[in-house]
Image: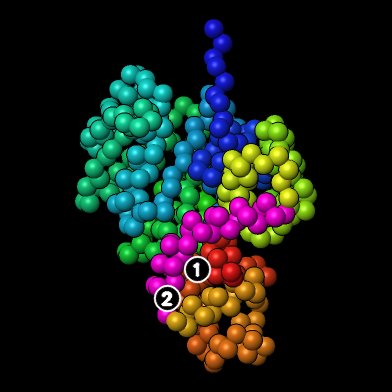
Amino acid sequence: MAASKTIIANPFSITSYMGKEYFCDRIAETKELGDALYNRRNITLISPRRVGKTGLIQHFFHAVNPEEIHCFYVDLYSTSDVQSFTKTFAEAVLTKCITPFSERVWAEITHFFGALRPVFGTDPITGMPQCSIDVQPQRVEWTLQQIFAYLEQAKRPCYVAFDEFQTIAEYENGKMEALLRGYIQQLNNVRFIFAGSKKHIMMQMFAAANRPFYQSTQMMYIDVIDEDSYYSFACKHLAAHGQQMDKAAFHELYIMVDGYTWYIQALLNRLYQSNISHIKEDTVITVVHQLLQEASPTYQTYCKLLTSRQQKVLRAIASEGEIKETGSGAFLLKYSLGAYSTVRSAVISMTDKELVYQKDNGAYTVYDKFFGLWLKQ
């Protein structure tokens, strides 16, 4: 009997990768990743959050033949030191290796990592195998070395993606970059994607001559998906649901969120759910208003964590959409912001908190696009 096809309730996902049919474009970027790794070049992948770097990695890994190459995705966002890095890395590798479950692989891993005492179990929600390792502080570097050794001796090449890689630059001891570089440069069977969302930190790590990873990778930047390509993708899935969307309506949606993938997906997800047969500009505005109302308590909390000066500057930036000269007399006067020195201090502080983002053209914008729209109301 043929396997039944998974029913997708909504083709516009905002939580996980659902397969190539539900992934928009990124054809050139996917090829660039493949060409680099296949030809033994590690990649530094940089983009702002919610533009789609994680989705691109997952899409690329999905396209790789698992019979030829092992792929491992490691999210470093919640790590804070070498020990948590090693634990996260080890569990990601070992969980992937035992999925689907195989007694032979289980025995092989237990033999190889016996001293680490890995504990295997099953996720109570997904039913998928999972692994837990207790990394002892005094054996962190040895454990990390074992993980790399395990990947190096694998019968197939391995691709490892470290997401939010800039996190390691903030570890307290300051030695993680040199430690990793020392292991990685000795590997022949493993290629790496170093993905990050903080461009200035990633550039320092890979382009500064005094840093361990200096010029060791191919640099790759991803921008927003082309509007026409995204519109075609949206129309295809909406049409299958008996809906049509005016191009002007999609343009309104696209420019409101600067083309950022996650926000477009969030809005399309709601529009699909609405079952409205003909989506116009006013439909989009209504859906945006609903989303902002839902998020209002969260955004109010954000504001309470800021000083009154920071709030005022943030609202001014949101009202402009983006502002290149935060110290210009016209900008300061228009929003009654006071002295440039205090505005500059507020902008720097909010940039560090990732409330404000500086684009490649030097302009500042509110990082969370929905938050920016809420502030602008």
- Asked if the stretch drawn in magenta spans residue 290, the answer is yes
Density class for disc 1 (Cα within 10 Å; few <14, some 14-19, many ≥20) is some
- Left or right of 354? Residue 39 is right
Which part of the image, by quadrant, shows the C terminus?
Answer: bottom right
Density class for disc 2 (Cα within 10 Å; few <14, some 14-19, many ≥20) is some
* Identity of the residue drawn at 55% across and 75% down: 315
Q: Is residue 183 above or below residue 34?
A: below
Of residue 57 and residue 193, the one placed in the foreground of this image is 57
* Residue 112 in the image, given as x and y percentages of width and height: 30, 30
* Residue 129 in the image, given as x and y percentages of width and height: 35, 29
Of residue 79 and residue 311, the one placed in the foreground of this image is 311
- Looking at the rendered image, the disc whose residue lies closer to the viewer, 2 or 1, is 2
Q: Is residue 223 above or below residue 161?
A: below
In the rendered structure, which segment of residues is drawn in magenta? 281-307
* Identity of the residue drawn at 30% across and 43% down: 143
The kind of residue tagged 1 is Leu
* Residue 22 in the image, given as x and y percentages of width and height: 62, 36
**Residue 355 numbered tag:** 1
Q: Is residue 96 above or below residue 166?
A: above
Q: Main secondary structure of the magenta part?
A: helix
The kind of residue tagged 2 is Leu
Q: Please say if the residues under marks 2 and 1 sit with CB atoms less than 8 Å apart.
A: yes
Of residue 177 and residue 339, the one placed in the foreground of this image is 339
Q: Dividing the picture into quarters, in which one does residue 176 lie?
A: bottom left
- Label 2 SS: loop
Q: Earlier in the sequence, mark 2 or mark 1?
A: 2
* Identity of the residue drawn at 28% across and 29% down: 121
* Identity of the residue drawn at 47% across and 62% down: 296
Q: Is there any visible trace of residue 361 in the rendered image?
A: yes
Name, please, the residue furthest toward the bottom.
339
**Residue 306 numbered tag:** 2
For the image, the number of numbered tags is 2
